[in-house]
Image: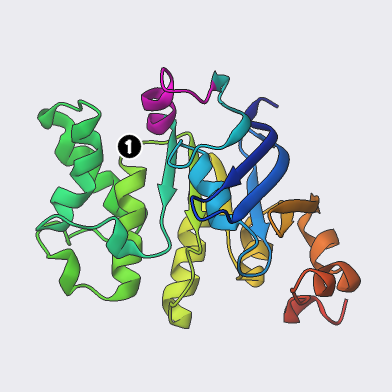
Amino acid sequence: MEKVIEIKNFSYTYPDGTEALREIDLEILSGESVGIIGPNGAGKSTLLLTLNGILNGRGGIRILGLEMNNKNLNAIRSKVGIVFQDPDDQLFMPTVFDDVAFGPLNLGTEESVLKVLVETALGQVGMQGYENRSPHHLSFGERKKVALACILSMHPEILALDEPSSNLDPHSRRSIIKILQQIKGTKIIATHDLEMVLDICQRVIVLNHGRIVTAGKTKEILTDTELMESNGLEVPASLRSL
């Protein structure tokens, strides 16, 4: 399988001196669904933000064969879609249609095909018919779905999601999980929701203090009690009897 993400000896330090990522080496293959887990402050969100150049550090990153640099940045950002933890960080237009259309318009999409793109993306997240609604009048779960549709409308080859199930009621959480299960392509999910990781991800990366502790098959990692507890995590309830 093709390597779509290659990270070699990558480190990132915030302007205040906090070292968020340390000597990261990581490869992700085409079509993989990968969970990134670890305690608060482990560097999960920071790692996601390096994948389309929002944050730049020291070391090498290649996305779909393109080296991360200023020359390739626009091409990389058209291929990597990041869905933020808080949907309000992505929704800022007067209507749902305008928000979902914003990305394709910036990529030069002709207006003649824009309506179909928006309708298709909203259909993928179960939000058909909401085109003329104000995003800020929707529930938090609905806004999460619209934020995801904003990224899906650009047809990214790699989808990176930061805590997609956080702060959702059980019904909305299950709905998001079903949507993500149906989306094809490479998915990288940074989350504390380990039951969701079990439902979606074939592989897991454990991150702690900015370093990759280990990586492996989801169930093998999540049932390793000593590994989980030593990294501020717990074996998911559904696996404790195994």
Q: In which quadrant is the N terminus drawn?
A: top right
- Identify the amino acid type marked 1: Met
Q: How many marks?
A: 1
Q: Residue furthest front?
A: 16
**Image check: 81 left or right of 233?**
left
Q: Is residue 202 magenta?
A: no
Q: Is 89 on the left or on the right of 118, as rendered?
A: right
The crowding category of the residue bearing disc 1, from other C-alpha atoms within 10 Å (few below 14, some 14 to 19, many at least 20), is many
Up-down: is 238 above or below 220? below
Asked if one can make out residue 45 in the rendered structure from this viewpoint, the answer is: yes
Q: Is residue 77 above or below residue 36?
A: above
* Element assignment for label 1: loop
Position of the C terminus, as image quadrant, is: bottom right
Viewer-proximal residue among 41 and 190: 41
The magenta stretch is 67-78
Q: Nearer the viewer, residue 43 or 78?
A: 43
Q: Residue at x 44, y 28 (%)?
A: 76
**Residue 214 screen position, x and y as percent:** 82, 52
Asked if residue 204 can be seen in this view, the reply is no
